[in-house]
Amino acid sequence: MINISEVIETNTMIEKENLDVRTITLGISLLDCISSDLDALCRNIYRKITVVAEDLVKTGNEIEREFAIPVVNKRISVTPIGIIGASACRTPDDFVTIARTLDKAAEKVGVNFLGGYSALCAKGLTAAEKMLIESIPEALSVTERICSSVALGSTKTGINMDAVALMGRIIRATAEKTADRDSIGCAKLVVFCNAPDDNPFMAGAFHGVTETDAVINVGVSGPGVIKHALEGVKGRDFEVLAETVKRTAFKITRLGQLVAKEASKRLGIPFGIVDLSLAPTPAIGDSISDILELMGLERTGAPGTTAALALLNDQVKKGGLMASSYVGGLSGSFIPVSEDQGMINAVNAGALTIEKLEAMTCICSVGLDMIAIPGDTKASTISGIIADEMAIGMVNQKTTAVRLIPVIGKGVGDTATFGGLLGYAPIMKVNSFSCEDFIARGGRIPAPVHSFKN
């Protein structure tokens, strides 16, 4: 039973500490839409999405009003389009046609983002997946709500270096296609190692082929709540610190479970998972960096940063697992630069570099996220950064991702502005030494020895 003191505590978290349900994401299978005729495929996709998601936004808004819980985003994820479009698409332009259809359907039902313009090529590229990847720059430049992701490796399969090399070129091309908007297309494009099938957060959300026909996944977030809780234990030992984070994560996750179950009941769609990731926003006080600094770091990036993040990530998961039997997605701590004012401040102070962020990704729940880099960065250098991050995920048996934004026409010292939840970011310095010959080798980096488990 929830008592009155818990109700008051939750209200305080919402009103003063930026607690919210970051997203209700409706996953929709498009497998029954497949057709060898492109026009028929697009009609099927539009009809399926607009029927299944017809009441998603309305339901989210009703829950927000009735429970006084902010539900910031209502989103959709679909079966990877590299699979759905394989029988109908003959050129990259055919895939762009599907992207336009998805965008139109997303606009019709009123969601802010739709994920799943995706290719799963961790071990190899089909002809259709290669065409989809080649279509990404155009697709993201002519749509508003579409998000794209590409799986490049896994612990079981190794790393597809042909796809890694291709994605370096695609990211640059996407940046150039949206150069007039600080290359914002790249903010909607992410590459993965060990991509999860049930992630509700963009840009990496897609509806996995092992999922049911439709499912409700919820992402909660509360960096401000964790920060407030830690202000009360300044100077205390690590045991107290860990217990405080764990207890607070429990309360945050329970709120997400409540919203997820309510949305599931009202929509008549099964509840999938709660993703308890701490996802920051540009709002002051809603920062992962602020939490790390409250633990005792002068600036995020100082020695001890990776250890502090390890404690935070682990205790968030422990608290969340006690609050819900169905925790999934990424679940941990996001460390995007552009969406976190504290991270931006650390970069500007010279405390935080890409190399330190890479070390932190061994611990956090995603990877190098929303990092603006100079617009003249070579495609091979981008591929090298991706390969490093894929290797971290592969060897550590965890999800890692890369969302880099080479901002055309800007360099170190400049700022890229994306707006809304995406915020703004200082352009970060990239190691200028070449890895071109390494990336040009092609083929596949084999899976690590500990992948062979049966």
Image (spheres, grey):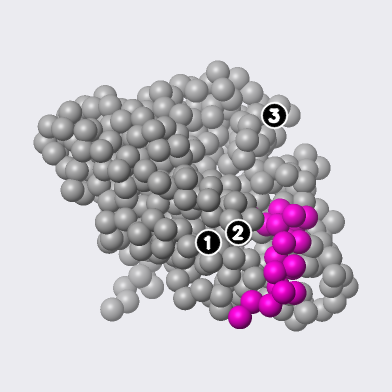
Residue receiving disc 3: 415
The disc placed on residue 67 is: 2
Residue 289 visible in this rendered orientation of the protein: no
* Mark 3 residue type: Thr
Residue receiving disc 1: 259
Please tell me which residue is depicted at 85% across the width and 70% down the height of the picture. Answer: 232
* SS type, badge 2: helix
On the rendered image, what quadrant is the N terminus found in? bottom right
Q: Earlier in the sequence, mark 1 or mark 3?
A: 1
From the top left corner, tell me how far across and down residue 121 is, in percent: 30, 48
* Mark 2 burial class by Cα count in 10 Å: few <14, some 14-19, many 20+: few
The vertical placement of 245 against 437, above or below, is below
* Mark 3 burial class by Cα count in 10 Å: few <14, some 14-19, many 20+: some
* Mark 1 residue type: Val
Do residues under tags 1 and 2 come within 8 Å of each other at their CB atoms?
A: yes
Q: Which region is colored magenta?
A: 1-21
Please tell me which residue is depicted at 43% across the width and 24% down the height of the picture. Answer: 141
The vertical placement of 283 against 397, above or below, is above
* Mark 2 residue type: Phe
